[in-house]
Structure formats: structure tokens, C-alpha cells
Amino acid sequence: MTTPTIELKPSASPLSDAERDAILANPGFGRHFTDHMVIIKWTEGRGWHDGQLVPYAPISLDPATMVLHYAQEIFEGLKAYRQPDGSVATFRPDRNALRFQASARRLGMPELPVETFIEACDALVKQDEAWVPAHGGEESLYLRPFMIATEVGLGVKPANEYLFLVIASPAGAYFPGGVKPVSIWVSEDHVRAVPGGMGDAKTGGNYAASLLAQAEAAAEGCAQVCYLDAVERKWVEELGGMNLYFVYGNKIVTPTLTGSILEGVTRDSLLQVARDLGYEAEEGRISVDQWQRDSENGSLTEVFACGTAAVITPVGTVKRTGAQWQQTSGEPGEVTLKLREALLNIQRGTAQDAHGWMHQL
Ligand code: PMP
């Protein structure tokens, strides 16, 4: 199978500088999309073909297209950051490419070569470079690669045709008014994923499964859900879209990957960044009872969530059935902020990229 080259068919009518600047002044998250997208087709027997960069536009699907019925879909999320010299770099796109392959295997979909995934992201960012916010803040261009089953038919089976696409959306600072702790509802009724299920794949179904618990959290006055393991309903796994870290003084601990936790690129990067800063960093099992006990006795000094969107989010109030505690009293903890700054500085190009994580375009 040959690696497709992406044919460039740019838009004859991209947004004007003024229109784009108006969006970039207040982009929010996932609300606006750049002028172009990349599409690559896969057909059984032919492999990947017809890679194109085209104007951003709706795609037309037959009502019986398989993805609409059986959810054979996977996606990724990564960011491009403006560097101090004006160039643009993406953060660890190879890790996203590998996770995309792992998700594809789990859902019976074809694996896109790592170099094609990166080539597609690069082509879109290069074409729409003006959409990458200026250097300095926490703004970025969020890339959303995804793949859907496009065979038409209602039989339940792996499709024989797929579309891979990349779209891009400018993302404002997650905390425009300064980093603020988030409140967490620990769901003891709903689980996100089960052993042997799809929790470690980045597929839409996992997010659909999280919406009811998310509504429950909102009704409890909380912003995010923390999921426990599905078997004992005891061990802390992760949030709906972020991994968790527990800070015990100089040591940070993140739940061990069980197969039902998504292996975050940020989670992995922080194990390294923390060690670089002289902290101990490890994976381990933490029960919700231990979380509550160690917070109450003061040994658990900080808790934070991490992911591409917010990089690091401190945890404030934690609520579970019959109990509530304050992880931090209003202000984010010291370790949380140090790690956040250290990782952001690598991404913004203001700290040395000791591990070669930034992919220059
Ligand atoms: N867990 C889940 C369920 C997620 O959706 C995400 C976001 N991709 C993460 C963790 C964090 O992963 P990453 O650091 O790669 O964004």
C-alpha cells in the first residue's frame, strides 16, 4: 500500500483577514472552523487513496451509511501552537497518530500510517496558518482528525469504505480569567467503560455514554464527572475528557492504565515533565475512599485533571453520594501550577524541548 500524497485544492474564497481576525479575537472552543479540511478515502482492496486538501464544506452521506447506525467512528485531538519566531509547531502528533491506530484496531477499522496522519495535519495547518493565534497566550489551533465508516448498508460488520478527515478550529485560552479549580461529581451509578470494552479507544460512543452522567453532575452543581472502575465501583479511573493526577507532596500519581482509561498524551507528557522538575511521578491505584480520606487528613495536597484542551485543570470541590470535600480552597495548588507552566512553555516554545516533542511545520 502506498502512502497517499495530499493534493492541494485550496478555496477561491477564504474568509477575509478582517473576518478571521474577528473570530480569533474571541474563538471559544470548537465553534469556528478554518477555511479548509483534508479528506483521504479508504476502500477495501485499494487502501488509502485520493488524499485532498479542499475548502471546508458539508459532506453528503446516504441515510444508510454505516457510521450513522453502528457508530464505527474514531477521532483525535491535538494542537498547533505559534512559536516565538512566528513559526508553527504541533505537540507530539506521533502520539496521536499511534493512538488513532490503536483506536482503529479496536473498532475494526483500517490503520492510517503515522506519516500520513502527520502529513494530513501538517497540510491543513500550513494552508490555514493564518488561523493559528499569535504567540504569547494559551491560544492554539485545535486539530480534529477523525475517521468514519462510509459503506452504505444496515448489516452489522466492519465497513469496506471509510473517510479520514482533518478539520481545525481556533481555541481560545481555557481559563481566560486565570486558572480556576473545577468541581467534580464522582459517579457511582454510571460507568464510562468496562473491562474488555472500548474505554482506551477514542471513539464517539464513549462520549455518548458519558452524557447522562454529565447531566447528573450538572444537577449536583458540578462541572465534570469522575468515573470509577466498572467492576468494584471503587477505583478512580478518569474524567469524561481528561485524565487525573493526585499530588502527595513531592509525588504525583495517576491511575494505572486498565484498558478502560484513555491513555492521554498530556498524562504521558506530565509523567516526564514532573520527573524533569525533580518530582516523583508514578502510576498507581487510588480508590475514591482513599481520595476522600487523604484529602481530609491533608496528605493528598492537590488533585488536577489533564488533557489537550485545558492542559492542566485544578480540582476544587469533590462530591460523591453522601459526602463532599474541598480539594483546594479556591486557588490552584503550587505543584499544579508549576507543571502547567512547564508543559505550556514547551508547547509555546519558551522552554527547551528536551524530549523533541514539538513537530515544526
Ligand atoms: N481521557 C479522555 C476520555 C479524553 O477524551 C481525553 C482527551 N483526549 C483525555 C483523557 C486526555 O487525553 P489527551 O491528553 O491526549 O488530550
Image (cartoon, helix red, strand yellow):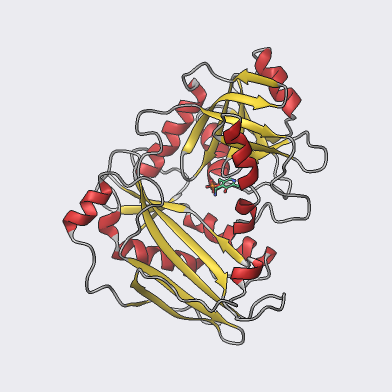
Residue at the (62%, 74%) spot, across then down: 66
Query: Depth check: 244 or 276 in front?
Result: 244
The one of 121 and 353 positioned closer to us in this rendering: 121
Residue 174, given in percent of the width and then of the height, sits at 41, 38
**Nearest the camera: 162 or 262?**
162
Q: Residue furthest top?
A: 297
Q: Residue at x 22, y 70 (%)?
A: 13
Residue 96, image x and y in percent?
53, 56
Tell me the quadrant of the picture where the C terminus can be found: bottom left
User: From the viewer's perspective, is 321 left or right of 220?
Assistant: right
Q: Quadrant of the N terminus?
A: bottom right
Q: Position of residue 39 (x, y in %)?
A: 44, 73
Is 327 left or right of 312, judged from the image as shown? right
Residue 112 percent across, percent down from the top left: 55, 70
Q: Residue at x 82, y 42 (%)?
A: 231
Task: Answer whether residue 352 is visible to the viewer in this image.
Answer: no
How many numbered marks have been drawn onto this rendered protein structure?
Answer: 0
Q: Measured along the vertical axis of the image, is residue 295 above or below residue 53?
A: above
Q: Is residue 195 visible?
A: yes
Extreme residue toward the bottom, this view: 45
Residue that sits furthest to the front in the current view: 219
Determine whether, in the image, residue 247 is placed left or right of residue 330.
Answer: right
* Up/down of 89 relative to 56, above or below: above
Q: Residue at x 75, y 30 (%)?
A: 287
